[in-house]
Image (tube, rainbow, N blue to C red):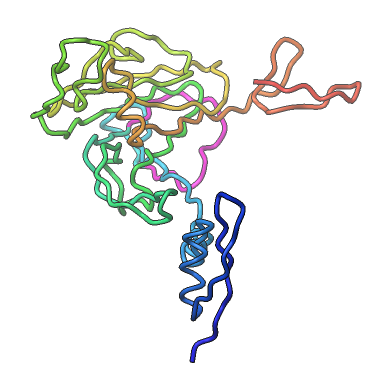
Amino acid sequence: MPMQYPIWICRSNGQSKKRYIAGAASVATVLVALFGFDPQAFAQRSERTVVEPPRANIERGPTRLGTRFTTLAAPLAPAAVAGEVFLDLNIQYTDAKIYNPATDRPDSVRLRSYRDVRETNPPTIPFVAPTIEVNPGETVRLTLHNQLPQQDQSCPAPDGNVNSPHCFNRTNLHAHGLWVSPAGNSDNVLLSINPTVSFEYEYNISAGHPAGTFWYHPHLHGSTALQVSSGMAGVLIIRGSRTPAPQSNGDIACYAMPTGRHIASV
């Protein structure tokens, strides 16, 4: 006969009743019902780990024809160099699973995402865009290939209001925080890259550009929130090696002053 476990059920009037349940499985059931604690889910949650986003596969060289294919297995050497950086990202639907904290279980989802054209293996977390690392003095040529379906019931806005979410399969790209031109095919948030269209962005990063961690994401009015919340956003790192000087901060996070004080720099 299974062991009996006593429990007390409290009522809103302050009274309580004693009941008995049998078996360890029943104990787990009561824990879930009364306290929202699921031992199995807790074990699964403790096994979840944080995985770094994939690194972008880029080409580097003076021209597209003379490029050298580079897989960023390690951060770039921190040096201001001339030349061009090429990378290509597909915009497409991705099917995978994402953790649901409300149920402690993974849910199957289909989301819009950036995928590296040159990826050799699907990333562990496919909804997070590749991390891009470049140097001051380089020109970044990033080509977006919009492979989302042309048929889009959200376009134009169903209610005719341009401020309502709409045209979810149209997009563009914004390099958030970079000191680059906002016009032409540079950081121009007024462009619209429609399905089946490929477009090359050009970011001329000056030799004096500060090092830092920036990010890139869509910025088309009407579809930005939906696309970013789907995971269409990635880290953009500029590596630098400028040392501090009396007239400038340099590229290191902090440095010791003669007085012993530490001053943070950008």
Please give the name of the residue rendered at 28% of the width and 10% of the height, measured from the top-left corner: 190
Q: Position of residue 179 (x, y in %)?
A: 48, 13
Considering depth in this image, is 177 or 162 the residue closer to the camera?
162
Please give the name of the residue rendered at 56% of the width and 26% of the height, measured from the top-left corner: 212
Q: Which residues are magenta?
A: 70-86
Q: Quadrant of the C terminus?
A: top right
Q: Is residue 194 above or below residue 19?
A: above
- Whether the magenta-drawn stretch holds residue 28 is answered as no
Q: Position of residue 132 (x, y in %)?
A: 43, 34
Please state if 222 lies on the left or on the right of 263 as rendered.
left
Q: Position of residue 36 (x, y in %)?
A: 50, 56
- Whether the magenta-drawn stretch holds residue 80 is answered as yes
Q: Position of residue 236 (x, y in %)?
A: 46, 30
Please state if 57 lies on the left or on the right of 205 as rendered.
left
Please state if 118 lies on the left or on the right of 5 as rendered.
left
Q: Is residue 162 above or below residue 199?
A: above
Please give the name of the residue rendered at 25% of the width and 29% of the height, measured from the top-left corner: 144
Please give the name of the residue rendered at 49% of the width and 15% of the height, measured from the top-left corner: 206
Tell me which corner region of the image, top left, top right, bottom left or bottom right, holds residue 111.
top left
